Image: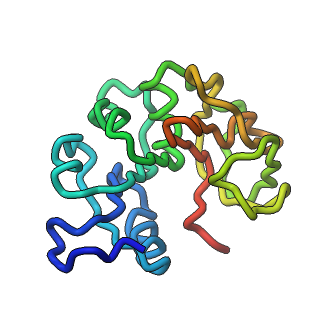
Amino acid sequence: ILFVNRDFKTMRHIAILDFGSQYTHLIARNVREMEVNSKIYHHDVSAQELKKENAVGIIISGGPQSVYDKNSIKVDPKIFDLKIPVLGLCYGHQLIAHMLGGEVRPGKIREFGRASLVLEKETEIFDGVNKKTEVWMSHGDSVASVPDNFQIIASTPDCPVTVMADDQRHIYGFQFHPEVVH
């Protein structure tokens, strides 16, 4: 539990970087429901600012754009050097792959709705999760190859890289939305 300091500006928290996802506030609420502080930041917040404000983890939200759009938005690449956990959801998953040397392509099909996730490898972030579980997908692009030091952890029938993980640096990407429950 991260309730360490009652001064919100310096309180340890999970930073949620907003990329325009319809679920950003739901992510923040779900984090708070786990009794962990969260704070939403504009996507262009600097790594230095996140460090100064005591972020102990980062969630990169989803969003409507493609990493290859002419004006696609990115994160400060130095956030990956902060030595704190980073989780990318949907667009955030694709952005991590793209920025760290993986490849993102237009998906063979656009997925929207329920999908059957199959965990193929063990990783700490999925400890206690069933090997087969239902998830909520909403994407057109997909990660085609993972960056160096990442492993493919889970897939769905239409998305071979649904979850990727670099357990050494605690950087994770989920193509699905764990914050959505239907």
* Quadrant of the image occupied by residue 135: bottom right
Residue at image point 76% right, 46% down: 122
Q: Please name the colour scheme applied to the rendered image.
A: rainbow
Q: From where the camera sits, is residue 4 visible? A: yes
Q: Taking 164 as reference, is 11 above or below it?
A: below
Establish if 177 lies above or below 181.
above
Q: Position of residue 60 (x, y in %)?
A: 41, 49
Image quadrant containing the N terminus: bottom left
Image side of residue 140 versus residue 2, left or right: right
Image quadrant assignment for residue 37: bottom left
User: Where residue 140 appears, x then y in whole percent?
Assistant: 59, 39
Q: Is residue 103 visible?
A: no
Q: Residue at x 37, y 35 (%)?
A: 80
| Number of marks present in the image shown | 0
- Residue 70, percent from left and from top: 33, 24
Position of residue 106 in the picture relative to residue 74 (left or right): right
Q: Which residue is nearer to you in this view: 90 or 79?
A: 79
Q: Is residue 29 above or below residue 100?
A: below
The C terminus lies in which quarter of the figure?
A: bottom right
Across and down, in percent, residue 44 comes to 22, 42
Left or right relative to 74: residue 168: right
* Residue sticking out furthest to the front: 4
Q: Nearer the viewer, residue 16 or 69?
A: 16
> Which residue does the image show at 18% across and 73% down from the upper left?
8
- Out of 163 and 68, give the one closest to the viewer: 163
- Write the residue at 29% across / 56% down: 55
